[in-house]
Every structure is written in C-alpha cells, then in structure tokens.
Amino acid sequence: MSKFRKKGKKSQPAINTASLPDIVFMLLFFFMVTTKMRETSLKVINVTPRATEIEKLEKKSLVSYIYIGKPIKALQGAFGTAPRIQLNDAFKTKEDIFQFVEMERNKRVEVERNLVTWSLKVDQKTKMGIVTEVKQELRKANALKINYSTKKTDKIVN
Amino acid sequence: MARREISEINAGSMADIAFLLLIFFLVTTTMDTDGGLIRRLPPPIDKDVPPPLPINQRNIFEILINQNDQLLVEGEYIQVTELRAKAKEFIKSNPNYPSVADESNASYPNMPEFRIEEVPVLGNVLVSKQIISLQNDMGTSYEMYIKVQNELVAAYNEVRNEFAMNKFGKSYTELVQQSESSESISEKMEAVKKIFPQRISEAEPKKIGGPE
C-alpha cells in the first residue's frame, strides 16, 4: 500500500560543481570589461555638490579632469588647508593650466582635440575665487566646453 | 621507450584562481558615471573687436550672489527656492506665450522683448530676447553657485517641457530621448531649443579692491 515508503537511508548525491569555474569566469570577464581604474590618486578632498538637472558625459575618453579642493588630511601638514588645484597627479598653480590644456589636447587625435570636455571636480566647500580663476585660465587656453561635475539627487535641500 | 600517458592537469584550483581575480576586480572597480552641468565658456576677449552694444536692461535677468551666499535677483533679495519660478516667468517673458502678437511685449514692460526668428517645423515665431546674467563674489561658496546654476537649468527645462507638451504633446525630455530615432522628433527638439535658448552669461569677474 505504501508506495512511497522510505527506502532506508540513502546518501544525497553531491552537487556537481563542474560549471562553477565557468560562472565565475563569466562574472570575472564582466568586471574586467566594465572596470575603469582610477588613473589619478586624489590629493584633494573632493565632495562634489548635488544637482538635479545633470547631463551625462558621453565619451569618457574625451574628458579631462581638473580637481580643486583642500589637500587631504595626510598632506595638510605640508601644504596647508587652502584650496589647491590638482592636475593629473600633482598640485599645480593656475599658471600651469594653459600647459596642461595643451598636453591633454596633444594626447588625443587631431580631430578630437576641440571636442574635449574639461570636467571641473570641485569640492562643495570651495570658494568661487579659485574656480573663477581656473575658468579664466581655461578661457585663455580656448578650452571652452566645461562641465561642473555634480552628483545626481532627486531634490535639492536648501 | 615506453610511452607514458600524459596525465590530465588538475583543474580543481581554477575556480579558486578565478575567484581571486573576480574579487580583485570587484573591489577595484568604480562604476561612477561622471555627469554634471555642462556649460560653454565665452571665448577669450579679443582686444581688436569692439565691445558689443549694451543690452536693454529689460532683457537681462540679473542674479548676484554675495560672499554670504545670499541672492539678489532683479534687485530683490530672495531665497534659492524662489529662484526657479522667477526665472521661468522671465524666460517665458509673457504668461500668455505663445499667443502673443506684440513684438515689444508692451503689456509687460519689465519683461524681455521678442524678436521674430525662423525655427524648424514652426516657421516664424516670436522668440524672447532673454539673457540671464549671473555674477558671483570671490567668496561665494561653490555649493551655492551650483545650486543657482541648477535652478536655472531646471527653469529652462521646465519651460521647454511645458511648451513642447502644448505644441507636440510630448515633453522636451521625451523629445531629447527619442531624437536619435527619428528625424522629425529631432527637428521638433531643435525648434524648442531655438525658441527657449539657454542663455546664461557669467559676467567677467570683477576684482573689488586689491591690485589689478
């Protein structure tokens, strides 16, 4: 009568893990392709402000970054707390911007040189004085397409 | 010589190696997509070119931000939260727009004038001569500056959205998203953009006091 009677103890078969490496490899390749390593290490405190109306920058290869902010804690002993400009990997002054623009342009192929966007990553606590100076330098160097880097948010709190 | 069978390589540890690499990439990856407010700076001043004619005061929406992050808009002290509505009003220039026939906008003497411009799809329409002028102090905080910029962009976007909704039954944002799929949508987008062009001028920085 009892058709489904337990047939005594039977050990469970082990789960086949032969396909596990394949799955892991798949994930690995996904991350390898999507990853973008940070080329510069930040030397300034950089918390960009929030905004609601942001546009995405289309081509990453056509963006050059200018960081502005206070030096990070570890460097404050040597450099003080006044806001500084960081280009690539070092602190620079505004006079170096012209040269930086030229260098960044020369890295790109000829046709793309005028399409470069200059993304200003400015810490939200910075005063406008230094930002205005940088903007004036960019104007002098004819680097006119700029982007105020901001984080996306849904609502601005006053 | 006896042929020895080549033993199979043990692939059991492959998963471990792959895991290790996976974790490495998981940790180092940054999925940040950079975005922000895109602006165009005015070209450098050429000394040979004569300065442009002064613009009629009514066409300028003047915003001043002082070092204490306070706003003065058109001579009035306001909060950032009120800025968007004021800017929208100004960009539209006339609450009845687009059913306005008068080029000089006589019924609203403090709002900008219009000029006739040819626009794709819609033909000749009245386009406001609005310009928003933004001036900040050296001591203004960047956070405040971005807030104001953001409100201005939002004002333009809202005006464009409303206008596009009325004219084409689609908001401007939708037009932008679909502009690549169809020529006619792209033309409509251009039309809206031309009627309400984003004109935010940042005044030449002024040095107050101190050596030149």
Image: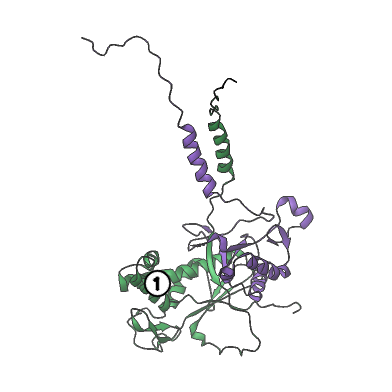
Pick the quarter of the image with the C terminus of chain B. bottom right
Does dot 1 land on a helix, a strand or a loop?
helix
Question: Label 1: which residue?
Answer: B160
Instruction: Please state the horizontal and vertical placement of residue B190, each as a whole percent of the image.
Output: 40, 74
Q: Which chain is green?
A: B
Q: Quadrant of residue A79?
A: bottom right
In-image side of A47 versus A1 (left or right): right
Q: A100 or B84: which is nearer to us?
A: A100
Does the image show residue B79? Answer: no
Q: Please name the color used to draw chain A.
A: purple
Say if B12 sits above or below A136 in the image. Answer: above
Say if A134 sits above or below B52 in the image. Answer: above
Identified at 42% across, 78% down, the residue is B194
Q: A91 or B62: which is nearer to us?
A: A91
Q: Quadrant of residue A89?
A: bottom right
Say if B48 sits above or below B81 in the image. Answer: below
Instruction: Please state the horizontal and vertical placement of residue B15, each as a whole percent of the image.
Output: 53, 32
Graded by Cα atoms within 10 Å as few (under 14), some (14 to 19) or many (20 or more), the crowding at tag 1 reads: many
Q: Quadrant of residue B159?
A: bottom left
Instruction: Please state the horizontal and vertical placement of residue A146, each as a whole percent of the image.
Output: 57, 68
In-image side of B113 versus A86 (left or right): left
Instruction: Please state the horizontal and vertical placement of residue B32, each as a whole percent of the image.
Output: 54, 53
Pick the quarter of the image with the N terminus of chain B. top right
Say if A85 sits above or below A76 in the image. Answer: below
Q: A40 or A50: which is nearer to us?
A: A40
Q: A116 or A87: which is nearer to us?
A: A116
Identified at 48% across, 69% down, the residue is B153
Residue sitting at the far front: B1
Does the image show residue A73? Answer: yes
The subunit carrying tag 1 is B
Residue type at mark 1 is: Arg
